[in-house]
Image: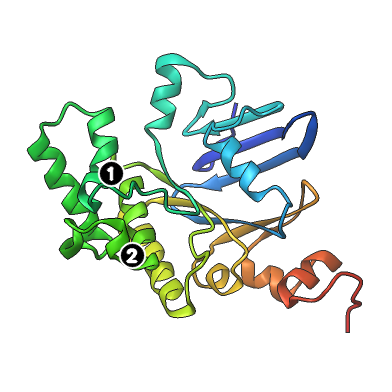
């Protein structure tokens, strides 16, 4: 079972992979309630695989993943549904339905998971859009708004059921620096004001420093460092961590 100290997520001895290939080996870490926790690493290190195992999209090969004290590994039926209700997910592309308005996109989880009438779903969807700064765009289609606004709409949909945890996969991907900074500000605001716990897979260094309370770094399927992002940058624990934060090529030596 997970230990105490306000751990809302705990990953214990987890290994993951597919098609006979192990991608992650013996992963162990905890996420505290209310923090912004960052998963870092280069391309192909296993960031997205870790995230997809944590949300139950892929089955772990071994180990345990506790969400709010409940082990999602092997959970099924009503127990699995209870765990899934505790978190929302924003995928890298946003994954909005192009033929639906923003309000209709955000209302989808409410339609699936609640017994609210259409008027109630509409009201809540518009409230969530207002919380991410899109209150005036509820009747727009995704194609009619910018990429940054699409990301915000995807966050609103992930928040539809008032989850305790939000998982974000590369939220700043494809955004310009100004738009990315605005999204960072939104994440910090939601964390501070609503107490939402964020787990974010990214490699955007500017965002990491702006929003991250703690981070872990993956290399070749293993955790090589964990701590405050700025402390990891200023006091790297090994060559890979130093190269990652200094954007140095492989094989470079410390100055």
In the picture, the disc for residue 160 is 1
Q: Is mark 1 on a helix, strand or loop?
A: loop
Residue 149: numbered disc: 2
Q: In this view, does 105 lie to the left or right of 176?
A: left
Coloring applied to the structure: rainbow
Disc 2, SS: helix
Q: Which of 82 and 251 is in front in this view?
A: 251
- Say if 75 sits above or below 37 in the image: above
Q: Can residue 156 be seen in this view?
A: yes
Find residue 168 and report its horizontal and vertical position in percent. 48, 52
Q: Residue furthest bottom?
A: 255
Tag count: 2
> What numbered label is drawn on residue 80?
none
User: Measuring 67% from the left and 34% from the top, which residue is drawn there?
Assistant: 12
Quadrant housing residue 112: top left
Quadrant of the frame with the C terminus: bottom right
**Left or right placement of residue 122 versus residue 114 in this view:** left
Q: Quadrant of residue 38?
A: bottom right
Name the residue: 13% across, 44% down: 122
From the viewer's perspective, tell me whether residue 180 is left or right of residue 38: left
Marks 2 and 1, the one that precedes in the sequence:
2
**Whole-number angstrom distance, CA of label 2 to CA of label 1:** 17 Å
Looking at the picture, how far across and down is residue 88, in whole percent? Answer: 40, 42
Residue pictured at 18% horizontal, 56% vertical: 138
Q: Residue at x 53, y 42 (%)?
A: 5
Q: Assess whether mark 1 and mark 2 are in contact (beta carbons under 8 angstroms).
A: no
């Amino acid at each position: 079972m997970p230990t105490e100290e306000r751990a809302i997520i705990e990953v214990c001895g987890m290994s993951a992979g597919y098609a006979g290939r192990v991608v992650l080996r013996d992963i162990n870490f905890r996420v505290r309630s209310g923090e912004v926790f960052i998963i870092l690493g280069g391309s192909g290190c296993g960031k997205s695989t870790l995230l997809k195992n944590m949300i139950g999209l892929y089955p772990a090969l071994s180990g345990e993943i506790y969400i709010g004290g409940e082990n999602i590994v092997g959970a099924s039926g009503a127990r699995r549904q209870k765990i899934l209700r505790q978190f929302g997910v924003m995928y890298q592309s946003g994954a909005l339905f192009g033929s639906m308005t923003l309000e209709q996109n955000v209302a989808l989880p409410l339609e699936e998971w609640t017994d609210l009438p259409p008027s109630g779903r509409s009201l809540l969807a518009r409230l969530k859009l207002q919380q991410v700064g899109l209150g005036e765009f509820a009747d727009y289609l995704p194609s009619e708004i910018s990429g940054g606004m699409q990301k915000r709409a995807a966050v609103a949909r992930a928040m539809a059921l008032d989850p305790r945890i939000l998982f974000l996969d590369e939220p700043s991907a494809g955004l310009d620096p100004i738009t990315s900074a605005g999204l960072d500000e939104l994440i910090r605001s939601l964390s501070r004001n609503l107490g939402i716990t964020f787990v974010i897979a990214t490699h955007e260094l500017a965002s990491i420093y702006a929003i991250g309370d703690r981070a872990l770094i993956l290399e070749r399927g293993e955790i090589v460092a964990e701590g405050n992002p700025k402390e990891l940058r200023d006091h790297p624990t090994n060559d890979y961590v130093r190269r990652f934060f200094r954007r140095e090529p492989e094989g470079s030596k410390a100055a």
